[in-house]
Amino acid sequence: MDVIIQIVVFVALLAVGYLAGRRAEAKHYRSIIAREKALGAILVFPERLPPAIHPAPASQLVSGSVVISVDYFKRFVAGLRMIIGGRLTSYESLLDRARREAVLRMKEEAQALGADQVFNVKFETASISKGASKSIGSVEVLAYGTALIPRTRAAARH
């Protein structure tokens, strides 16, 4: 009887994880897409140095950080995939959302400063372990770069 209860609990956790995880992920993607459209005017460049601009703009470090948790269903599917090998697609969407959210938060900080461009954009990623099994509990992504603030806007802020 205990085995049946454990199986029922396991299946219930998978079902809840799947349904709640898909709903939360879809909602987050809708938010990301809407905010990407709204912040599309702020350009982001991986290049280290911006082109020569006269007069030289003011600059400031901007960053955006996010921690996103892995749901129970994705953790289970990833565990199965690790047994047989291959891409962990259940984690790929997690990382995609985290990177995009971190860039959006960085852009929001740049926008608040009056910047219209961010150069030398870099990413740092860390996984946060959960439990004795050291499985991934959540992932943190930090996006940072140098915001260029046109002198007219920089002067208006002060």
Image (cartoon, helix red, strand yellow):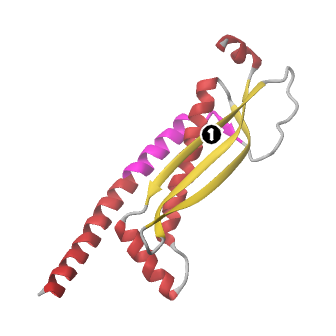
Identify the residue at horizontal 64%, vertical 34% (top origin): 42
Q: Is residue 13 left or right of residue 60?
A: left
**Could you tell me which quadrant the N terminus lies in?**
bottom left
* Res. 22 image quadrant: bottom left
Q: 139 and 46: which one is in front?
A: 139
Q: Amino acid at mark 1?
A: Ser
Identify the residue at horizontal 66%, vertical 43% (top origin): 144
Residue 97 vertical position relative to residue 32 in the rendered view, above or below:
below
Near mark 1 (Cα within 10 A), the count class, few <14, some 14-19 or many ≥20, is many
Determine the main secondary structure of the stretch shown in magenta: helix
**Could you tell me which quadrant the C terminus lies in?**
top right
Q: 1 and 113: which one is in front?
A: 1
* Residue indicated by mark 1: 63
Question: Is 37 included in the stretch rendered in magenta?
Answer: yes
Question: Is 31 included in the stretch rendered in magenta?
Answer: yes
Q: Residue furthest front?
A: 132
**What is the span of residues highlighted in magenta in the rendered image?**
27-44
Residue 60 placement (x, y as % from top left): 72, 30
Residue 15 placement (x, y as % from top left): 26, 70
Secondary structure category for the residue under label 1 = strand
Residue 48 vertical position relative to residue 128 in the rendered view, above or below:
above
Identify the residue at horizontal 54%, vertical 62% (top origin): 127
Q: Is residue 119 left or right of residue 134?
A: right
Identify the residue at horizontal 54%, vertical 54% (top origin): 140
Q: Is residue 100 left or right of residue 150?
A: left
Q: Is residue 70 left or right of residue 150?
A: left
